[in-house]
């Protein structure tokens, strides 16, 4: 009795499929655990948590955990940080108490110093941090343009006015054309 290839394939799949499905059953270690048991419980969000004023304040302040991120980015991306949620609660408490954003930032600057700010104020010596990089880049560009133009003038003077490249193709008279043709035929032979 002959079995067709199709029947052999179907019976092989029918025998192998239950074995494969048994292997995919979740093991005890793969079962989903209680999310509350995994880490610390997060507070539920309120409308004040996503208030644009609160977010703007948090974006101006550096998180003190050492991550170099602003408070908002740290508290929304690094869920292991304990500093940014505490700073966030303090900002919300100060804002709820009626303080304006500038006075909230002033509270943090008075306690931590200017290092708490993501960008220092543009005054005094801090102004150099805003002006010097642009001035250095502008000086470099001006120097490069001056060097290229001076070098171009030196090359033009060294080669003379006759060697300037013209946009027009060179004019070849008939005698020169015949000479070139003979030279090419001699090479081909």
Image (cartoon, helix red, strand yellow):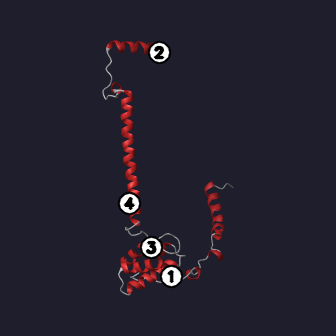
Of callouts 2 and 3, which one flags the residue occurring earlier in the amino acid sequence?
3
Position above or below: 156 against 140: above
Of callouts 2 and 4, which one flags the residue occurring earlier in the amino acid sequence?
4
Residue 50 visible here: no
Position above or below: 126 against 71: above
Give the residue at mark 3: 114
**Distance from the alpha carbon under mark 4 to that under mark 1:** 43 Å
Position above or below: 69 against 141: below
Tell me the tag on residue 42: 1
Crowd tier of the residue under label 1, counting other residues whose Cα lies within 10 Å: few below 14, some 14–19, many 20 or above:
few
Please report contact status of discs 2 and 3: CB closer than 8 Å, yes or no.
no
**Distance from the alpha carbon under mark 2 to that under mark 4:** 67 Å
Of callouts 1 and 3, which one flags the residue occurring earlier in the amino acid sequence?
1
Crowd tier of the residue under label 4, counting other residues whose Cα lies within 10 Å: few below 14, some 14–19, many 20 or above:
few
Secondary element at tag 1: loop
Q: Position of residue 110 (x, y in %)?
A: 44, 79
């Amino acid at each position: 009795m002959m079995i067709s290839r199709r029947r052999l394939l179907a019976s092989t799949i029918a025998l192998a499929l239950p074995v494969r499905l048994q292997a995919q059953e979740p093991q005890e270690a793969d079962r989903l655990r209680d999310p509350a048991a995994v880490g610390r419980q997060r507070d539920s969000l309120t409308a004040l948590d996503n208030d644009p004023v609160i977010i703007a304040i948090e974006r101006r302040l550096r998180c003190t955990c050492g991550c170099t991120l602003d408070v908002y980015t740290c508290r929304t991306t690094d869920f292991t940080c304990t500093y940014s949620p505490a700073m966030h609660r303090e900002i919300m408490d100060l804002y709820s108490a009626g303080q304006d954003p500038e006075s909230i930032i002033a509270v943090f600057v008075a306690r931590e110093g200017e290092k708490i700010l993501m960008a220092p104020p543009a005054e005094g010596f801090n102004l150099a941090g805003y002006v010097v990089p642009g001035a250095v880049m502008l000086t470099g560009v001006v120097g490069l343009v001056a060097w290229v133009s001076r070098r171009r003038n030196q090359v033009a003077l060294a080669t003379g006015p006759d060697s300037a490249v013209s946009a027009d193709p060179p004019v070849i008279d008939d005698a020169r054309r015949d000479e070139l043709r003979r030279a090419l035929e001699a090479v081909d032979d």
